[in-house]
Amino acid sequence: AAGVIQSPRHLIKEKRETATLKCYPIPRHDTVYWYQQGPGQDPQFLISFYEKMQSDKGSIPDRFSAQQFSDYHSELNMSSLELGDSALYFCASRGQDRLYGYTFGSGTRLTVV
Amino acid sequence: KQEVTQIPAALSVPEGENLVLNCSFTDSAIYNLQWFRQDPGKGLTSLLLIQSSQREQTSGRLNASLDKSSGRSTLYIAASQPGDSATYLCAVGTTSGTYKYIFGTGTRLKVLA
């Protein structure tokens, strides 16, 4: 069965650089969520999209932006990277039926040096 | 604001023991609750999903219960094995505002051979 695809799996960037993370949800899933998990931390909600519109916003820095495209894939853009942005970034998708909960991708590990 | 806490934060047990992981949440207005397993540096693997109308779910050696009124869920692992060593996270699907998951702080489990 198709899963949530995230790319790249690993990314190394220098401070002040820009990074773009991509998420391809399960087909026919219309909602995408982004989470950030720092070392030893639990995942923190960043932002979500429903039908290509932002539906909710969590603790996402102003340096970050995201969008969902017409094919429902989503991109998280991170600018002026800081050492503290080093984390595992997860994307999850959900269909209209909440009975099935979230399905998470394998994550993108971002390391800022 | 929903807060999710997991106790204990870390647990070390000998192989073969039955064990219970606890998850508490402050707002009982939840849609569902999902337990995940996370190996170090890896993604989130879904273990069990309990809807708010359900009392428990079982999968193999795992059993999760939900008591919405008291704001608690437990994950019971029978006959623990070294391969069960991982961090276990519970996530609560909120109904206040837009639907999203709030994660617990995690329990780091080590099963000794």
Image (cartoon, helix red, strand yellow):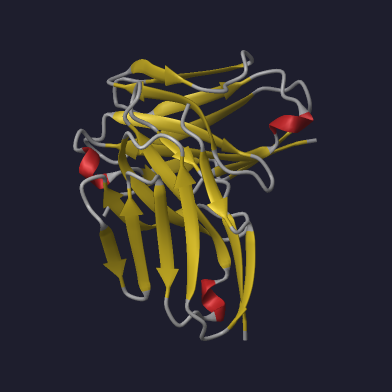
Residue under the point 41% across and 31% down: A33
Check the image and report above or below for A42 versus B40.
above
The residue drawn where x is 32% and y is 18% is A52
Q: Quadrant of residue A104?
A: top left
Pick the quarter of the image with the C terminus of chain B: bottom right
In the image, residue A51 sits, relative to residue B7, either above or below, namely: above
Horizontal relation, residue A44 to residue A41: left or right = left
Above or below for A32 versus A102: above
> Which residue occupies the foreground of this view, A14 or A65?
A65
Task: Please tell me which residue is depicted at 43% across the width and 45% down the height of the picture.
Answer: B91
**Can I make out residue A74 in this image?**
yes
**Picture quadrant where residue A69 is located:** top left
Residue at 21% of width from left, 35% of height from top? A28
Q: Tell me residue B111's x, y (percent).
A: 60, 77
Dividing the picture into quadrants, the one containing residue B92 is: top left
Frontmost residue, B45 versus A75: B45
The image shows residue A76 at horizontal and vertical percentages of: 52, 25
- Residue B77: x percent and y percent? 44, 72
Where is residue A8? Give x, y as percent: 54, 41
**Left or right of residue B28: residue B24:** right
Q: Is residue A11 left or right of residue A105?
A: right
